[in-house]
Image: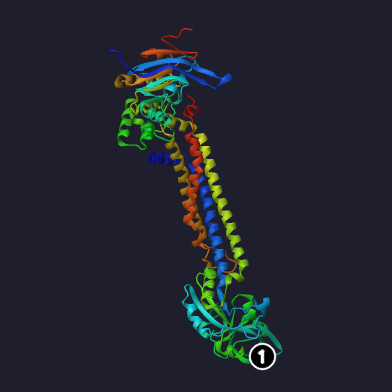
Amino acid sequence: MTKSPILIVEDLTKSFGSGEHEVRVLKGIDLAITRGEVVALLGPSGSGKSTLLNIIGTLMRASGGRHEMLGVDLSAASDAERTRFRSTRLGFVFQFHHLLLDLSALENVMMPAAAAAGRETHSMRERAKDLLAAVGLADRIDYRPAALSGGQRQRVAVARALINRPALVLADEPTGNLDRESSDRVMDLLLRINADTQTSFLISTHDEQIARRCHRRVNILDGKMFEGRAQR
Amino acid sequence: MPLYALKLAIRHLLAHRGQTSLLVAGVALGVSVFVFISALIGGLAELLTARTVGSIPHIVLEAAERRPQSSWGGDGAQIVRQKDLGRRDQIPVWEPLIEVIERTPNVTAVSPQIAGGAFIERGEAVKPVSVVGVMPDKLSAIADIAGAIVSGSGDLPPDGILVGSRLADDLDLRVGQVLRIASDRGRSRSLRVQGIFTLGIGSADRQTAYINFTAARALFDLPTGVTRIEVKVSPATGADGIAARLQRSTGLDAIPWTRENSQLFEGLDAQARTGLIIKTFALVTIVVGIASAMLLSIARRQAEIGIMRAMGASKALVVTIYLIEGTLLGVAGGLMGASLAWLALLPFPPVDEAQVGALPIDRAQGDFLLAILLTSLAAMLASLLPARRAARIDPVDAIGT
C-alpha cells in the first residue's frame, strides 16, 4: 500500500525583487515526502536548495504554488500559525550548529520545546537527556557549546531538532562543516533516528556519499527539480 | 512564557558579566545623581524655608485698612469719603478673636501684640527701634527669643526690656543696665535690660526690642486694643489658605508670610525646576544608555535571535526577553544607585543640625523609592524599541541559511 505524503509541494515558485530586477529562484517545484522517508536534495550552489528548505521550513513564504504539510495549508496560514507549526512539527539542522552559546547542551536541546511552552518542564528535561544519550553525548549535557568539538555540537543540534518529535527534519548541509569521520557519524545518527522513529528527513547536500545513503534523491538545477541524478 | 524569558534574560546578563556590570554601574551613577540632587534641593528648600519662616509670623492680622471710598449720591453727585486718619490703627476688641483664631485648624500659636516705633536714649546716643509688646508667656510663640538669649534671661517683667545683640553693641548695653525709651506717641519710661538676644536676622538684632505687654500699653498710650495679632501655622506653606480663612472669620486684614517673601518663593521654585531638569537629564541618560546598549547587544546577537525564531520562538517571547533584560538592568542599577547615594549621604547631618556652610542635605527627601521605580520603568521603556526590533529580525537573514 502506498504511503500518503506528509509534505506536498506543487508548482512552488519564489522570486526576489520585482520588474526588471526580478530574480526567479524557484520555477515550479513539485515534491512530496512520505512518512519515514529520507530524501537527499542536491544541486550546485545558488540553485535554490536553501530557499526551498526555508519555504518548506516556514521561514520564508513562496511566491506561488501549493505548500501543504500534515493536511495544513501553510501557504495560507498566518505568521503566528506558521511559527506554531514550525515549533511543533518541524526540526532543523543547519550547516553551522547555531547553538545558543549561553546555554548548556541540555538547555539547547530543550530550547525549541521550552520556547513553545514558555517554560522548561521535567518531561522536557528527561527527553532532552534521552536524546543527548542517543547522540552519544550523555556525559556532555552540562557542557557549553564552546567546550564541545564541531562534531559534538552538530550532534547536539540534531538532538535539538528532534525534541518536539517533528514529522520532518530539514537538514541544510548538516555535514558540510565536518570532517569525513564526523560526517559519517552524524549521517549514521540521522539514519538510526529515522529507522527508530520513522521521522522523515530532507537533507540538502553537495556530498555524493551522503546522498547515496538516502532513500531517494532529488536535484535542483536552475530552479527546477529533477528526480534521480541531474541531467544537464 | 515569562518564566523561560526570565531565565534566558538572566542567563544572558550573567554570561556577559563585564558588559552587564558596566551597564548597571552607569544606571547606578544616574540614580545616585537623581537621589543626591533630590536630597540637596529638598534640604536646601527646607533650610531656606525654615530659616525664613522660623523667626517670623506666618500670618499677621491687622485692623482692616480704612481706604478712601466713593459713592454716587442723589442728583448724580459723587460723594468721596477720604481715608480716616482721625483714629489709630488698632484692633480694639481682640480678646474674643484670639479664641476664634486659636480654634482655627492648623494654627499652632497666637500672639497679640502692641507694637510701634520708639527711640532708645543712652547718653548722647539715640537709636530708633521697633518695640514689640508681648505677653511674657507668648514671648517665644513666634520667634524663639528665649532660645536666642545670649546674655541675661528671657524673663519679661513690666519694667524689663530685651534687646538685640547688635543694638546692645551700638549702645554698649549690658544686662541690668537701665535705659530710657521714648515712643512715637510722646510717652517715655525707663526700663532695665533683662536680656540680649541674637536671632541671626540683621534687622531684628539691630532694631528690635521686646517689652512687657502692660508696659507697651502705657508706652504707646493704648489702654484697651492691640496693634496686631501674629499667628504661626503648620505647615508654613499652607499660610495663604489659612490667612484667607482668618480674614473671613475675624474681619481683619490677614497677611500671609508668602506675600512679603515672594522672591524666596521664586527662588525656591527656580531651584526646584533646576533640580527637576538635572533629574530629568539623569533619567534621559539612563534611558539612552540602556537603549543603546540593548541595540548593540541585539546587533551582536542577531544570529542567536534568528535561531530562536527559526526553532519556533514567538515574537512575543523575544520581546519579553529583552523587556525583562532591560528592566533587570534598571532594577539592579536603581537598587545599587540608591544604596550608593544612601551611603554617600550618610556623612551629611540632618538639616536642623547642619552648621553654617555645611551642605543642607535632607536624606528623607532623597526620593529613593521614586528613583528606583522611575529607573526600572525608564529601563523597561528604553528596552521596548530594541525588543521590538529584535522581534522583527528575519531568521533567514540572521542565520544566513
Q: Quadrant of residue B15?
A: top left
Identify which residue, B47 or B336, lies in the foreground. B47
Q: Quadrant of residue B46?
A: bottom right
At 34% across and 29% down in the image, what residue appears?
A164
Find the residue positioned furthest to the front: B75
Identify which residue, B262 or B315, lies in the foreground. B262
Residue B24, x across and y down, in percent: 50, 47
Residue B373, x across and y down, in percent: 47, 52
**A101 relative to B53, above or below:** above
Residue B284, x across and y down, in percent: 55, 48
Find the residue positioned furthest to the top: A231
- Asked if residue A30 shows in the view, the reply is yes
Q: Mark 1 = which residue?
A: B186
Which color scheme is applied? rainbow
Residue A158, x across and y down, in percent: 38, 25
Say what secondary structure mark 1 lies in.
Answer: loop
Q: Is residue B121 left or right of residue B96?
A: right
At 31% across and 19% down in the image, what residue appears?
A195
Q: Quadrant of residue B150?
A: bottom right
